[in-house]
Image (cartoon, grey):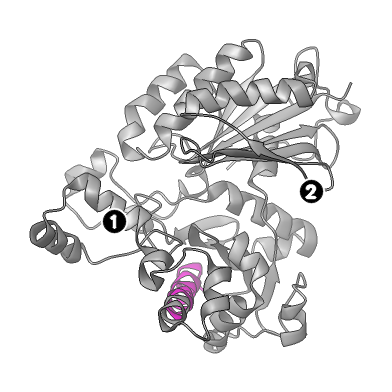
């Protein structure tokens, strides 16, 4: 039997999961997602080793606890959970203290409960999932992998918010998110282009329904577009991105919005959905763009902001050697990539149309001063790697189950953010 690592990636209304067999590289044996948790049309989809959808079925789950328990039941029917030697959990917010993955203990759970007000959309559900898996797998090492860890050591000026200093002492600062995606992109860039390229001046663009960018230099995050919450930065599917704080005050006063209504407005009703009045999905908006002016404006707003933030991230990186597109939009939309890059020629960015249309790994022309790449991201691989690096000693395997290849430790040892 192949020892396995199970990864759990909990979102605000979904849970992604994957089962990896130990090998070099890791082998994805099974993956899937439970979507629209708590709604009447909750469903589970599963994919095989080759990425093909093999199952799509109704999945009744009222909340995160219910989802965790029922997901374990589903996995017991479709996989040998007796081979699971470690479990890695994506935790969106690690607060001011967690700068690397941590073995899940009672103390870690208590700290996550303490900082839950920093991320009420994610942390309560993620804590619930942790508890379910700890109860069902009491003897299996479990690891919390933090999305904020990648950005933890940004320069002080990139972390500070321009508000009274007492708030900084209370943990109110710019954190940044999508860190597990950025960790994967940096490692994959080193693999495909070499360590020198990965240590250059980079702008990593994770563009999907949630969208952000990060400036990286010499392997260190220098700045990012998301801030205290994932609502900040670029316009997204349903999130507004950056807004004038005075606008929020105006809406509270003029429309009588309380905190919950304002939260719903900026996180669920804004972004591409709000501007288009149609959909948060970029593909649908591009299809409607020729005949729907509101859809066209939403697309142009997204591209305008992406160009602006890409230039800002290049400034934070001290220049630009490589621009990487990832995420659902970044990986699949040649049109959006071309529109973003067309406004960055002053930085040396250019796109070769045929390469871009074919979604080639490198879409910039030969000899271009800036290399533009498309790298499909994989947060689950990052979770699995960080989990192994946390629980496996360099010359040991997981107790009684998972052994390091050749007794010398896997190549991903030490790859923690």
The answer to whether residue 337 is left or right of residue 190 is left
Q: Residue furthest left?
A: 253
Q: Is residue 13 visible?
A: yes
- The residue segment tinted magenta is 300-318
Q: Is residue 22 above or below residue 119?
A: above
Q: Badge 1: few (under 14), some or many (20 or more) residues near its Cα, within 10 Å?
A: some
Residue under numbered circle 2: 51
- Quarter of the figure that contains the N terminus: top right
**Which residue is drawn at the image coordinates 53% and 86% (left, top)?**
290
Main secondary structure of the magenta stretch: helix
The residue carrying pointer 2 sits among few (fewer than 14), some (14 to 19) or many (20 or more) residues within 10 Å by Cα, namely: few
> Residue 333 appears at what percent x and percent y?
64, 72
Q: Residue at x 30, y 35 (%)?
A: 117
Out of 411 and 236, give the one closest to the viewer. 236
Residue 251 against residue 340 in the figure, above or below: above
Q: Is residue 298 left or right of residue 395?
A: left
Asked whether the residues under the numbered discs 2 and 1 touch, taking CB atoms below 8 Å apart as contact, a structural biologist would say no
Which of the 4 quarters of the picture holds residue 114?
top left
Residue 164 drawn above or below residue 360: above
Residue 305: within the magenta? yes
Q: Is residue 241 magenta?
A: no
Q: Which residue is mark 1?
A: 265
Alpha carbon of mark 2 to alpha carbon of mark 1: how far?
35 Å
In the image, residue 37 sits, relative to residue 247, either above or below, namely: above
On the image, the x and y values in percent for residue 338 come to 61, 82
Label 1, secondary structure: give it. Answer: helix
Ranked by sequence position, the earlier of labels 2 and 1 is 2
């Amino acid at each position: 039997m192949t020892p396995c690592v199970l990864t759990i990636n909990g979102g605000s209304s979904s849970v992604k999961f994957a089962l990896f067999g130990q090998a070099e590289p890791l082998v994805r044996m099974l993956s899937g997602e439970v979507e629209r948790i708590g709604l009447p049309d909750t469903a589970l989809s599963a994919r095989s080793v080759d990425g093909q959808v093999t199952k799509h079925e109704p999945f009744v789950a009222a909340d995160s606890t219910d989802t965790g328990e029922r997901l374990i039941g589903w996995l017991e029917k479709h996989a040998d959970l007796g081979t699971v030697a470690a479990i890695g959990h994506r935790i969106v917010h690690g607060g001011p203290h967690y700068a690397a993955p941590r073995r899940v203990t009672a103390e870690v759970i208590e700290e996550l409960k303490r900082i839950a007000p920093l991320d009420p959309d994610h942390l309560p559900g993620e804590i619930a999932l942790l508890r379910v898996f700890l109860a069902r797998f009491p003897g299996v090492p479990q690891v919390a992998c933090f999305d904020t860890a990648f950005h933890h050591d940004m320069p002080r000026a990139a972390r500070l918010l321009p508000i009274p200093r007492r708030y900084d002492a209370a943990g109110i600062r710019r954190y940044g998110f999508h860190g597990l995606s950025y960790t994967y992109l940096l490692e994959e860039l080193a693999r495909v282009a070499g360590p020198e390229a990965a240590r250059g001046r980079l702008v990593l663009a994770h563009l999907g329904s949630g969208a952000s960018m990060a400036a990286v230099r010499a392997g260190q995050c220098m700045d990012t577009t998301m801030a205290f919450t994932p609502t900040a930065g670029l316009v997204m599917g349903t999130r507004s991105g950056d807004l004038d704080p005075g606008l929020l005050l105006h809406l509270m006063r003029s429309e009588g919005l309380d905190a919950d209504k304002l939260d719903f407005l900026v996180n669920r009703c804004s972004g591409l959905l709000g501007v288009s009045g149609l959909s948060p999905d970029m593909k649908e908006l591009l299809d409607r763009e020729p005949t729907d002016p509101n859809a066209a404006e939403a697309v142009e707003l997204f591209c305008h902001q992406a160009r602006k933030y890409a230039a800002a991230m290049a400034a934070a990186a001290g220049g630009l050697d490589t621009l990487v597109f990832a995420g659902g939009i970044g990986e699949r939309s040649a049109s959006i990539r071309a529109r973003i890059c067309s406004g960055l020629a002053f930085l040396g960015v250019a796109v070769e149309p045929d390469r871009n249309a074919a979604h080639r790994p490198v879409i910039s022309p030969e000899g271009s001063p800036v290399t533009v790449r498309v790298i499909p991201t994989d947060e689950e691989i990052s979770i699995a790697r960080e989990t192994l690096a946390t629980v496996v000693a360099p010359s040991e395997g997981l107790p009684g189950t998972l052994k390091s290849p050749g007794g010398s430790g896997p190549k991903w040892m030490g790859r923690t953010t």
